[in-house]
């Protein structure tokens, strides 16, 4: 049903920037261990859209060339065992997994 969602997202002006802003907005909460459940869910939804970009053949290489995976490292480096941090780690790994398929 949404086979062309990834190219539509990637080629629409400012969408990638907005998605990155959503990701970056929670960095302070991650470093201070103050990440809320709502923030985590919001970023997980963004990561789901990014996973769509990572898995589509037309957007995979532009996604990699834009160094998008670097923005997930703070989520992967967190050592907190709280569920909201675990959700972000799993969603981030999902995006990376989509890249290597």
Image (cartoon, rainbow, N blue to C red):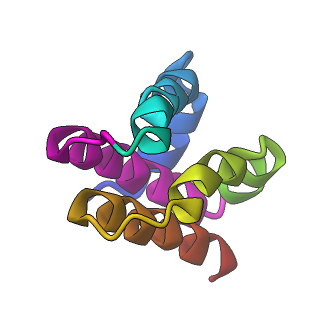
How many numbered markers are drawn? 0
Q: Position of residue 36 (x, y in %)?
A: 21, 41
- Examine the rendered structure and indicate whether residue 26 appears above or below residue 91: above
Residue for point 68% across, 58% down? 60
Pick the quarter of the image with the N terminus: bottom left
Pick the quarter of the image with the C terminus: bottom right
Quadrant of the rendered structure where residue 55 is? bottom right
Residue sitting farthest toward the right: 65
Residue for point 55% across, 64% down? 76
Residue sitting farthest toward the bottom: 101
Q: Main secondary structure of the magenta part?
A: helix
Residue sitting farthest toward the top: 13
Q: Is residue 27 one of those drawn in magenta?
A: no
Horizontal side of 84 relative to 27 (left or right) equals left
> Which of the two residues, 35 or 38, is positioned nearer the viewer here?
35
Q: Is residue 40 one of those drawn in magenta?
A: yes
Q: Position of residue 54 (x, y in %)?
A: 58, 60
- Examine the rendered structure and indicate whether residue 56 appears above or below residue 40: below
- Examine the rendered structure and indicate whether residue 42 appears above or below residue 63: above
Residue for point 71% across, 50% down? 70
Horizontal side of 95 relative to 87 (left or right) equals right
Q: Please provide the residue range marked out in magenta.
A: 34-58
Residue sitting farthest toward the left: 38
Q: Position of residue 52 (x, y in %)?
A: 46, 57
Q: Position of residue 18 (x, y in %)?
A: 48, 22
> Which of the two residues, 75 or 43, is positioned nearer the viewer here?
75
Residue for point 39% across, 35% down? 29
């Amino acid at each position: 049903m949404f086979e062309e969602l990834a190219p539509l997202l990637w080629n629409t002006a400012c969408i990638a920037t907005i998605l990155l802003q959503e990701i970056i907005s929670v960095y302070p909460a991650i470093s201070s261990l103050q990440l809320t459940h709502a923030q985590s869910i919001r970023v997980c939804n963004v990561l789901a859209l990014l996973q769509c970009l990572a898995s589509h053949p037309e957007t995979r290489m532009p996604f990699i060339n834009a160094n998008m995976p670097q923005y997930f490292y703070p989520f992967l480096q967190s050592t907190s065992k709280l569920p909201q941090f675990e959700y972000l780690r799993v969603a981030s790994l999902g995006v990376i997994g989509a890249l290597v398929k």
